[in-house]
Image (cartoon, rainbow, N blue to C red):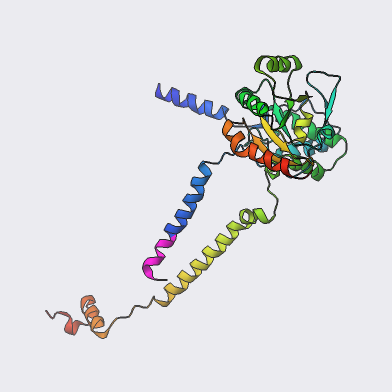
Amino acid sequence: MKNFLLVFFVLVGLGAVPSHAGVTLEAFTFETPDEEERFKHLIEELRCLVCQNQSLIDSDAELAHDLRAEVYTMMQTGRPDDEIIQFLVARYGDFVLYNPPIKPSTYLLWFGPFVLLFIAALLLLRAVLRQKKTTAPQISTEERKRLDQMLGSNPAEGNEK
Amino acid sequence: MSRHLRYLVPLAIFAVLAAFLYRGLSLDPKLVPSPLIDKPVPSFSLPTLKDPEAMISDTTLKGKVWMMNIWATWCSACRAEHEVLLHLARTGKISIYGLNYKDKRPAAIRWLQQLGDPYVANAFDEQGRVGIDWGVYGAPETFIVDKQGIIRYKHIGPLSIDIVNNEILPLILELESAAG
């Protein structure tokens, strides 16, 4: 019974894997496969503002339907990709882009990880260099003698005590 | 840096991170800042809700401070907001225009008859095309436009009495006193 339940939930889980299957693009017809590719690529890069973790190609929201149609119409009237994207950014902001543009307010986002990596590398380098300097331990002659005794490397004095 | 002090560095980093994350808990990701703020009103020309023959456009509204409220009968938050709009209309401080967004005309007219009508007029945007120009993604949304036809304020989601008293009425006062 337990095994059966496990299998059941695994199957349910597999079924829940998100895919583009939820939305049909049959309403849109294209003259060439390239055109269709271009359309799919465009709406994959644009975020649906209603269900924010879905792109326009994934979302079944009413607004996503409308915006897909809008993008399609603009494509059909021969507008280039950047103009179509600009159209949406002007209305909904940079938030519609899955790929945020590089500008002063996003410098931290784009370059922050590299800055952190650089700092980490510096710290690592410093730690390694410092360790090298202190590898040869300093011991006094007295200590050296005791050590030799313990290791028995000097049999003449070895069995003292 | 003394030996003890440097152990505080990770703690400090943690504190800063925790402060940012804590702030993030109370931010609503649904509220996307509008790029339309401080931009001219997107031009539109639509039939009015009550009379399909009459047209309403942005140019007829130039020269005064006005409010654009995007609503629909299928939007339950709009019903919650309706009382607040009626209250604001009764103050007489601002002309409220509506954009009836992707709705059915008879249903919308019935809604206004039953619940009361705070709007001077409504533009009927059946296809939602004008809504796209205004960057609408979730009704209700409310814009305030100044005398020059520049959008000065946007609120996403239902208005409350608090928002009206603390944000909208002071802004109207400021915009009305500006030269135009």
Q: Quadrant of residue A88?
A: top right
Residue B108: image location, x then y, percent? 72, 18
| Along the line of sight, the residue nearer the viewer: B169 or A50 | B169
Q: Quadrant of the N terminus of chain A?
A: top left
Q: Specify whether B46 is left or right of B84.
A: right
Residue B41: image location, x then y, percent? 78, 38
Instruction: Please check the rendered image and state whether residue B8 is part of the magenta-colored stretch, yes or no.
Output: yes
Q: Quadrant of the C terminus of chain A?
A: bottom left
Q: Residue, x 27% and y 83% (percent of image)? A: A140
Q: Residue, x 45% and y 54% (percent of image)? A: B15
| Along the line of sight, the residue nearer the viewer: B127 or B34 | B34
Magenta span covers which residues? B1-9
Residue A91 visible? yes
| Along the line of sight, the residue nearer the viewer: A94 or B124 | B124
Instruction: Please check the rendered image and state whether residue B5 is part of the magenta-colored stretch, yes or no.
Output: yes
Q: Quadrant of residue B168?
A: top right
Classify A22 as above or below A48.
above
| Along the line of sight, the residue nearer the viewer: B64 or B85 | B64
Residue A150: image location, x then y, percent? 21, 76
Q: Specify whether A116 is left or right of B103.
A: left
Residue A138: image location, x then y, percent? 32, 80
Q: Residue, x 51% and y 46% (percent of image)? A: B23
Classify A93 as above or below B87.
below
